Each structure stands twice: as C-alpha cells, then as structure tokens.
Amino acid sequence: MAAKSNLINMALCLTAVCLVCAAVLGVTYAVTCEPIAAAAAAEAQASIAKVLPAGGEISEEIASDAEGVDGYFVQSDAEGAVTAYAVKSTTGGFGGPLTLMVGVLPDGTVFNTSVLSHSETPGLGAKCTEEKSGFREQWKGFAGALSVKKDGGDVDAITASTITSRAYTKAVTQAVALVQTLAAPSEPTVIPSEPTVIPSEATVIPSEAKESKTEEDHQ
Amino acid sequence: MSKLSLITKGLLKENPTFVLVLGMCPTLATTTSAMNGLEMGLATMFVLILSNIVISLIAPVVPDKVHIPVYIVVIATFVTVLQLLMQAYTPAVYKTLGLFIPLIVVNCIILGRAEAFANKNGVWDSALDGIGIGLGFTLSLTVIGIVREVLGSGAIFGWKFISGDGMLAFVMAPGAFIVLGYLMVLFNKIAKK
C-alpha cells in the first residue's frame, strides 16, 4: 500500500496534509462564523424574552459584581421607565454549576425563570428544565418566602431532588436581591407591598444606594 | 464482494456496536433517548464517510511511518467542520450532544475503518463501507436509545405514553450497560441463525 518512508517525504506529506486541512477549516470557519454568532445571539434573546413580560426595549447586558450574578438586562417601556429585569444567576447545583435566567419585576416579584445551563441528574434534578412541570409553573409570579418547604419556605421542591431545588431557589434569591438593590431607590412606594422582604431590603438600601445610582447612569 | 454486501455487512456481520464492539464511549453516553442516539449516529456517519473517501484517495502516497498522524489530522478536520456546521445551523442538537462531537475524533470506529478498509480499497468501495458501517452504528445507537427511553422515561422519540417517571436507572449510566449487554446477546443470537 503506502510509499516507503524517508525523512523528506514524511515531512512533505505532513506539511501538505496540514496545509490543506488548515485551509478547509479556515474556509468553514469563515462561512459559519456569522450563523454561529447569530444562533448564539438568538438563543440569548429568546431566553431573555421568555422570562420577561411581552413588549418593551431590552438593554445590552450589564455586568454585575453581586454574588452569583454574571450580568443582567433591563427592560423598559416607551417612556424609559423600567418594567422588568432579566438576571443571569449562577449557583452550585447537584452535579455542577446551575445557571438560570430570572425575570424579576421592579417590586421583587419573580415573573418567570428559565434554565440556561445545568449538569443535574437526568430524570431527577434535570426535571428543573421541564417547563410545564409544577416546579417551574410555581415560579411564575412567585412572591412568597424564598426557600424550599423543607427549610420552611414556600417553594415546592422537585421530588427526590432537594439539592437541585435549593440551588434553583438560591439562584432566584440572588436575582431578586439584585433587583431589589437596583429598584429600591427609584421605586420607594413599592416596598410596603412586599412585607416578607422588608428586613433584607432595609439593610440593603443604605449600603447599596450609591452603587445603584451609578447603575442608573449607565442606562 | 458485491456493492450491496459492502453496505449490509455494516448492519449485520460487522455491526460496529454489537459485533465489533467499537466506539463504546459515545454508545453508552449519548443514548439516553432515541433522538440523541440517532443524532450521534448520523454525526459519526458524516465523518466516517468523508474520512473513508479522503483516506482511500491519499493512502497510496502517504509514507507508512506517518500514516496514523495523517489519518488523525484528516479525521479531526472533518470533525471540526461538522462541529462548526452544527453550531451554526443546528444549535439545539449541538447543545445536547456537546462534548461528544469533538470526541468523534478518537472514536475507534473511524480510525479502525481507515486502517482496516479505506487504505486498501478504492474510493467508491470505501464510501460504501462508510455508509454501511455508519448506518449500522446509527441504527444500533437508535435502538439502544429507544429501549432506554421507553424503560427510563416512558417515552419514545420524545412522545410520552405514561405519566410520571419510568425506571430512572435506565436513563443513567448503569442502564446503558445493562441495555447494551442484553441487546448484544439478542443481536448475536439472531445474527448466528
């Protein structure tokens, strides 16, 4: 079959094969570069739109150094008033990092949630990705105490997946906490309607007020 | 060897999963549902056919001592092309199969066919061999996926026919080994007749 090997033909052959392969890859990359970026952007947009009320302008991603939050998006109506936030929140799940997109209204109510990436057990914790399950439905408009029922809160955990449910709840908590610090100075009238969260808000407002002001400037 | 038998031998006599027992890593890991198995099989088949064709073309001029690195570079190129294409046009599928797409490079079915068939045969025969083995792999993975999905989730190709859970063990790693083992016994019993 193959030709007899010597140093020159081995070097030539490897060089030629690598050059051709590199060229093929270069062309493929050039062709697919745009569709890949478009697909990634469409996916990000879809995940944001899914957790926010319909309509309104969605901002560019804003970086955040709040605990567990990678970044967030602000949705505003035609007059520029903030109508909702979409927060990308990460916690440690059962099998690895669990990243959620959490839509939160300015008053701290959860609008909807969606899973961006996870490594939970298939058939158990991975049920948190099933959109029509009771676990996911309960998050729409959720405003109760943010911890699973086993820990004294209002969240119904997924059967046999308490760790995943706790992680999910914690990710939502992080998102809500961020939104409360963001929304608190501009929406002071809303606070009384949320009796369960007053203590945490009261402690948060003074220290975070400066920071949230600069966030407002960004917009 | 007739052209047709080049294809059918991949399905039965040289079935890569149940007879040659090659490429077990994707076989066990990606067959959690029928659809995943089918997609993984098709992705592997794409690389297998193209690498068989190219390797059968270049084999006569490749010096013997460097033939493995050359084959691997060719295979890796096709895998990367596939990966980019999937990311661009089927992002959802790419997300499910994820890590196992780049791992097609080290799938021993592909290097195995290059060594055992493509470098000694013509382009046309090598392409048919790629199709045959590829179909055999795809069908095997789909069958394992169907069994695991039916038992583990009570569904078939995503269509659920029971409410609630199936036997969860079949969706996880132990179930993969159990299903593969029983299917292998069944397959070899039928194939021997």
Image: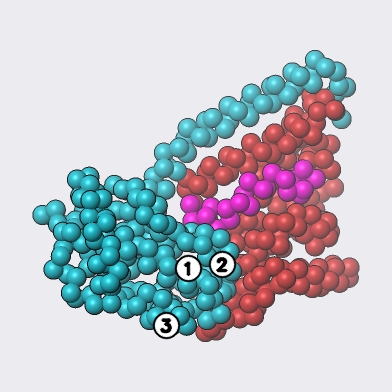
Chain colours: A cyan, B red
Q: Going by the picture, which residue comes out furthest to the top?
A: A8
Residue B96 position (above or below residue B103) = below
Q: Is residue B176 left or right of residue A7?
A: left
Q: Quadrant of residue B144?
A: bottom right
Circle 3/circle 2 CB separation < 8 Å: no
The answer to whether residue A95 is left or right of residue B110 is left
Judge whether residue A174 can be spotted in this image.
yes
Q: Which residue is mark 2?
A: A94
Circle 1 residue: A167
Check disc 3 and report the residue beneath it.
Answer: A152
Residue at the left extreme?
A: A79
Label 3 – label 1 distance at C-alpha: 15 Å
Mark 2 vs mark 1: tell me if same chain: yes
Chain under disc 2: A
In this view, B159 is above or below A25: below
Q: Earlier in the sequence, mark 3 or mark 1?
A: 3
The mark closer to the camera, 3 or 2, is: 3
**Residue B74's spot in the image, x, y percent?**
69, 34
Look at 61% across and 81% down and name the residue there. B166
**Crowding at mark 3 (Cα within 10 Å: few <14, some 14-19, many 20+):** few
**Which residue is painted at 47% across and 32% down in the image?**
A30
Q: Amino acid at mark 3?
A: Gly
Q: Residue at x 74, y 18 (%)?
A: A12
The front one of A59 and B162 is A59
User: Mark 3 belongs to which subunit?
Assistant: A
Q: Secondary structure at mark 3?
A: loop
Q: Residue at (58%, 39%) from the top-left corner?
A: B81
Magenta region includes residue B87: no
* Whether marks 3 and 2 lie on the same chain: yes
Region in magenta = B91-113
Is there CB contact under 8 Å for labels 2 and 1?
yes
